[in-house]
Amino acid sequence: MKKQKLKSGTVVVDMGKGFADLERTRCCGIYEFNGIDRPPQNLVTQVYEELGGDKYNIFIFHDVTCRGNGKRLCDFIKRHKLGKVTATASVNNPNTGRNITLWSWVVGWASLHKFMETKVIVKGHNGDYRKPEIETKIFDGKGYC
């Protein structure tokens, strides 16, 4: 889609703002976000596009409490009803002396799919717009869980 007038309430995902690193944990049903200093809509779109075909259920993310990136992502997920997010208490990281928080997001796939189909538009590097797309399934179901 070329540049267009966007409907009120449309969430624009700007590809130029980047994405986080998604890493599979030792459990095949859990993924971890690293580098969540990106806009929350980019992170949620990344989950949908890269892993929506695999239906991983839990994503964990962490942040230095005072930065606010984790809280922004948590608030975005809750505001758009994209699943259940739970946070730990903020604790001191003895390695850095800074307070950190860990969140877990149990994805509501039906809600996420509806949100992506009705509310989200992706702005590419060239300025063109497109709807979010799920990549092909990458997990063969023979994992180690």
Image (spheres, rainbow, N blue to C red):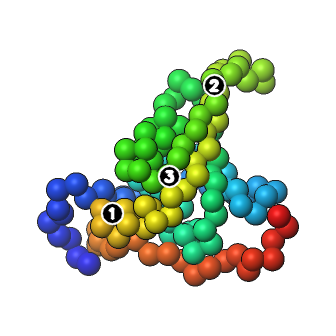
Q: Residue at x 45, y 54 (%)?
A: 82
On the rendered image, what quadrant is the C terminus found in? bottom right
Q: Are marks 1 and 2 in contact (CB under 8 Å)?
A: no
Image-quadrant location for residue 117? bottom left
Question: In this figure, which residue is indicated by the disc labeled 1?
Answer: 120
Q: Residues within 10 Å of mark 3 (few under 14, many from 20)?
A: some
Distance in Å between CA atoms under marks 3 and 1: 17 Å
Q: Amino acid at mark 3?
A: Gly
Report the number of numbered marks.
3
Residue 65 in percent (x, y) is at 57, 26
**Residue 84 drawn above or below residue 102:** below
Residue nearer the viewer, 23 or 29 = 29
**Residue 58 drawn above or below residue 91:** below
Residue 134 in percent (x, y) is at 50, 75
Name the disc covering residue 65, or none.
Answer: none
Question: In this figure, which residue is indicated by the disc labeled 2?
Answer: 89
Q: Are marks 3 and 2 in contact (CB under 8 Å)?
A: no
Residue 98 in percent (x, y) is at 66, 21
Q: Is residue 43 visible?
A: no
Position of 53 with respect to 4 (left or right) is right
Which is in the foreground here, disc 3 or disc 2? 3
Q: Residue at x 75, y 77 (%)?
A: 141
Residue 104 in percent (x, y) is at 62, 44
Distance in Å between CA atoms under marks 3 and 2: 20 Å
**What kind of element bears circle 3?**
strand
Sequence order check, earlier mark of 1 and 2:
2
Q: Residue at x 59, y 34 (%)?
A: 87
Image-quadrant location for residue 140? bottom right
Q: Amino acid at mark 2?
A: Ala
Question: In this figure, which residue is indicated by the disc labeled 3?
Answer: 83
**What kind of element bears circle 1?**
strand
On the rendered image, what quadrant is the N terminus found in? bottom left
